[in-house]
Image: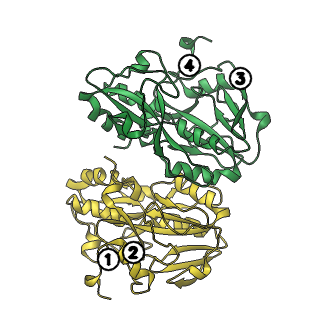
Chain colours: A green, B yellow
Amino acid sequence: MDRDALPKKPAELRALVRTGEWDTTTEGLAPGFVQANLAIVPKDLAFDFLLFCQRNSQPCPVLEVLEPGAYEPRETAPGADIRTDVPRYRIYEHGELVDEVTDISDRWQDDFVSFLLGCSFSFESAMLAAGIPLRHLQAGNDVPVYVTNRETTAAGAFSGPLVVSMRPIHHTQVVRAVQTTSRFPGVHGAPVHIGDPREIGITDLDDPQWGARTDVRDGEVPVFWACGVTPQAVALASKPPLMITHAAGHMFLTDLQDAHLAVL
Amino acid sequence: MDRDALPKKPAELRALVRTGEWDTTTEGLAPGFVQANLAIVPKDLAFDFLLFCQRNSQPCPVLEVLEPGAYEPRETAPGADIRTDVPRYRIYEHGELVDEVTDISDRWQDDFVSFLLGCSFSFESAMLAAGIPLRHLQAGNDVPVYVTNRETTAAGAFSGPLVVSMRPIHHTQVVRAVQTTSRFPGVHGAPVHIGDPREIGITDLDDPQWGARTDVRDGEVPVFWACGVTPQAVALASKPPLMITHAAGHMFLTDLQDAHLAVL
């Protein structure tokens, strides 16, 4: 299906995802609406995972948590079905990827607890609207992502390093970038570090662990934000018997508008 | 013990609370430091209660949640002991108050999960610092508190109405009051309503359910904030077999400074 022919409303897009007519990335779809990361864990891990998110709200901003067994995200997308409305799911057993599927209805368990977490797409929209260019988008690349030497705050079974994304910002716009993203704590919020990457244990900016290398040019400062890779990486490192997530870039489209997440 | 002779540091005050030398209200103690509401529930209710707080962050702003069985609040007051460092505790069984004590060490269970929630003391400090007078403080009264017709978002066993506090604000300072409290989402944040109390189901401002009646004078507007009574009222309404809270006004003193809770 042609991207340009797609509807703009999240509910209409979710219907196409549900029937399998759209099973690829959601970047750029439903502009102005919040896209969410998905993580599903069995109930016996849900308290620890929710506590981990609460203690680490920059990398793990909770948009909605569904009741055990529930699959309709009543707050962020009434009428949607979390089992069918994500383009691609990844199934992990004991921390290992065992399958990638477009529907998890036949694997659903009554004790599954689904977490929808904020995603940087919303927060990048806010920066673009504030007149801050983002090079990785201009280049059509994924944002570069790094593991830092900063530990998240552990919770129960879950612990591990903070993972960050980096965007080069011109020194005249760094303050504006802090202000703009601070207004969106629901999608990672303010930067966690500005400037020398070595201060947070990144020795080589040209060698990201995920995403594509991005130039930092004269007059630009590397600015680092907490990244939504953190909760998945941390959760999988604890090797839960079963965990289901979206596939990278294949997000859940909510009915929330980006603007609704702004504080002040 | 004389209030004026008390130390100013939270850790020193907690030591006096621990030994029983201070067992009365904490209002005005350790100025500039965050005081917290306490709620303890057994582990089997903890996920639902944490989810309730996550879904209702204005009435239930989470400062820290301790691991099951843990009694040291490592994030907000390292070295403290949640079993002894609150001046007065209330023990509830099946929603009924059964005891008020100054120490819960002998009642501690390995499955207890302790929640520290933000309290309006911090947020009132911010308003005073911004030059917004607060009449109930001037009068030496408790803030008036009302049950509204707005429902909280239910989570598992927990549901019930939103409870609010009211402060009369001069119309020239209403915008400033919104701005100032918006900076402190960790302690209830922005108002939930400004103006006509009937819009949120309050028929008689002169008849608060808790606290003292407060004048609203010419040129003043009643402004309503989500209140920390909400989580206790909602939790107790679900009649958990066992729940322990602080006694009203007898808060847990953290080492966090009010200023650290500010966003922007």
> Are discs 3 and 1 located on one and the same chain?
no
Q: Return the x and y of residue A69 as percentages of the image width and height.
A: 72, 46
Identify which residue, B45 or A145, lies in the foreground. Answer: A145
Label 2 – label 3 distance at C-alpha: 56 Å
Q: Is residue B132 above or below residue B236?
A: above
> Which of pointers 3 and 4 lies earlier in the amino acid sequence?
4
Dots 1 and 4 on the same chain: no
Nearest-to-viewer mark from 2 and 3: 3
Q: Callout 2: 10 Å neighbours few (<14), some, many (20+)?
A: some
How far from the left and from the top, in percent, is residue A134? 38, 22
- Identify the element where label 3 is drawn: loop
The residue to which callout 1 is attached is B141
Q: Dot 3, how many residues are within 10 Å of its Cα: few (below 14), some (14-19), or many (20+)?
A: some
Disc 2 marks which residue? B211
- From the viewer's side, name the closer residue of A217 and A134: A217
Sequence-earlier tag: 1 or 2: 1
**Residue that label 3 marks:** A19
Residue visible at 41% across and 56% down? Answer: B186
Give the label, 3 or 4, closer to the camera.
Answer: 3
